[in-house]
Image (spheres, grey):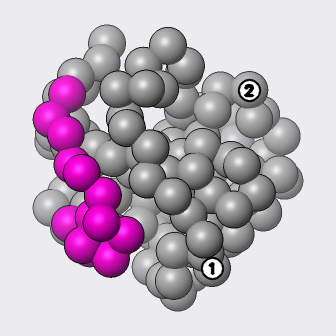
Amino acid sequence: MPTPVALEALSELEFIPQAIVDQPLSFFANKWKLEIVHGHDDLDEFDGAALRMHNGTLIELKHPSGYPPNTTVIYFSYEIRDVGRITDLIFEVADELGFPSSWISWKRSDNPDL
């Protein structure tokens, strides 16, 4: 079962967007009792939250400003680079967070060179 992590606790790590889910961040926050924080990085302002998955993988869930409403971006650590592993993790996250893979509108394997 995923456990909430303070987004601020991950500020020293680098995360990369790996998937877009067609659901608002509030869906995940409500379901998993996550605290949504407003923040910014080098590129965007965003609302976000973080989780540790059962396998120990840390993920960030964010809605960057300028992204379509009712979407959430899933971020993994920069250290996870293998596109096949990223794809597997995306589907593991969907399963563990309880949403159908049909909600995933984009994943890294759609643009592996990004």
Q: Residue at the spot x=69%, y=62% of the render?
A: 54
Bin the neighbour count of mark 2 within 10 Å (Cα to Cα): few under 14, some 14-19, many 20 and up.
few
Between 27 and 1, the residue placed more toward the observer is: 1
Task: Identify the residue at image location x=75%, y=35%.
Answer: 80
Question: Mark 1 to mark 2: distance in Å?
Answer: 22 Å
Residue pictured at 63% horizontal, 32% vertical: 77
> Can you give x and y, in whole percent of width and height, for residue 78 in the image?
65, 26
Q: How crowded is mark 1: few (under 14 residues within 10 Å), some or many (20 or more)?
A: few
Q: Can residue 56 be seen in this view?
A: yes
Q: Is residue 52 left or right of residue 80?
A: left
Say what amino acid the circle numbered 2 marks.
Answer: Glu
Q: Any mark on residue 95, and which?
A: 1
Q: In the rendered image of this protein, does residue 79 appear above or below residue 20? A: above
In this picture, residue 95 sits left or right of residue 43: right
Q: Where is residue 64 in the image (x, y as percent from the top left)?
A: 24, 40
- What residue sits right under mark 2 in the picture? 79
Which residues lie in the magenta part?
26-39
Q: Is residue 31 magenta-colored?
A: yes
Q: For the C terminus, which image quadrant?
A: top right
Q: In the rendered structure, which amino acid carries the disc numbered 1?
A: Asp
> Given contact means CB atoms under 8 Å apart, are the residues at marks 1 and 2 in contact?
no
Whether residue 21 is in magenta: the answer is no
Q: Nearer the viewer, residue 33 or 73?
A: 33
Per the image, label 1 sits on a secondary structure element best described as helix
In the picture, the disc for residue 114 is none
Residue 24, can we see it? no
Instruction: Residue 31: name its quadrant.
Output: bottom left
In the image, residue 68 lies at what x, y percent? 19, 57
Instruction: Please give the name of the residue rendered at 79% of the width and 46% of the height, measured from the top-left corner.
Output: 83
